[in-house]
Amino acid sequence: SDYALHSTMVNQADEKGRSSRALHKFLDRKYKRWIQTLSRVSDSRELEHYWAEAMESGDIGGVFWSLMTHPETSPELISRAYADVHMLSHLQGASNRADLKRLVALEAELIELRDASTCNRQNHAEQLRQRDDQIRRQAQELQAITAKHKQQLNEAQALSISDEEHKQNQMLARRVEWAEEKLAEREIINTELREELTGLKELLTETREEHQAMEQTISLLLENKNNQQAGVQRQIDLHGKQVLYVGGRSRLAPHLRTLVEAHNGQFNHHDGGLEDSRAGLQYTLAAADMVFCPIDCISHDACLKVKKHCQQQAKQFIPLRSSGLSAFANGLRNLTVDDQLH
């Protein structure tokens, strides 16, 4: 079991031997970037600053191991770090239970949305059918009136007509002109209705895609949850990489975090400068391995800054067409597929 493996490795790490040396080398390779960063620090207070920043961002693995192996780490800082990690284990357990409740709530919400979508599709289809029937009838009536008036006018002109008949013909001509104007108005209305119909179809398609993406996301989260409980390896594994999401809507951040953590990744969010400090964006970018930006919900200046940083640091920059959950899920899935192909 995981617990038996954990206990065995802890006991081996406490003794000098082949297992403890191999474990030490493995952790040094895994957190090489942090070890190199902190190796330039010779002040215990600056080490405390790094630990405080790691606790605030949630990315503590690399900093924790670097502190434990750093020659300038004070006994007080080691004790503090152990205490913080111990309390985080309790908080993580509570977070997992909250995530499970949130998954159940999302599944119930998905069922309601699917039922509502089915009802809306039926209502839209019926309304469109009735509208098409009405347009067809009105067009036929207008064509019949126009043809009748033109025939009467032609017959009147072919005959020797009196003044009274001439007046009637003028009245018929005005009626024909009125009918033609109405026909032109109907054509405009028909064009507007066709454009509205196209918009409704596009909206229906977007709604169906949104629901499908949400259903796939929840299914994937539940599958990953069951696989983790059964000891099955994830189909999509971010290998602990730090995923930064800049911009977007803050209320979606918990759902995005759940999706990233289900893929064995770490999630961080910065709103691009609305409430979070723009000065802190540079530090948040430095800790990230890949950056997502929804181009419809971020300032142009912040987006350019993020893109420039990623190009300079050779980090993956993934622009998203929208700030919705489905766009992020597709971007994450496509990014993971590309990594697997490479």
Image (tube, rainbow, N blue to C red):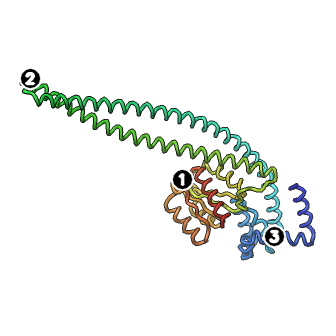
User: Of helix, strand and loop, which one carries label 2?
Assistant: helix
Neighbour class for label 2 at 10 Å: few (<14), some, many (≥20)? few
Q: Is residue 26 left or right of residue 261?
A: right
Which amino acid is tagged 3? Answer: Phe
Can you see residue 288? no
Rendering quarter of residue 156? top left
The 10 Å Cα crowd at callout 1, few under 14, some 14 to 19, many 20 or more, is some
Q: Residue at x 61, y 71 (%)?
A: 314
Front disc: 2 or 3: 2
Q: What residue is disc 3 on?
A: 26
Residue found at x 80% / y 58%? 85
User: In front: 327, or 83?
Assistant: 327
Residue 41, picture quadrant: bottom right
- Residue bearing the label numbered 2: 164
Disc 2 vs disc 3: Cβ atoms closer than 8 Å? no
Which amino acid, mark 1?
A: Ser
Taking the image as drawn, is residue 196 in sight? yes
Of 119 and 9, the residue lying toward us: 119
Residue that mark 1 sits on:
322
Secondary structure under badge 3? helix
* Amino acid under disc 2: Glu
Tell me which residue sits at (11%, 26%) in the image.
167
In the depicted structure, whether residue 255 falls above or below residue 272: above
Q: CA distance from mark 1 to mark 2?
A: 69 Å
Q: Position of residue 268 (x, y in %)?
A: 65, 58
Helix, strand or loop status at disc 1: loop
In terms of sequence position, does the residue under pointer 1 or pointer 2 come before the other? Answer: 2
Q: Position of residue 301 (x, y in %)?
A: 50, 62
- Are the two marked residues, 3 and 1, in contact with CB atoms closer than 8 angstroms? no
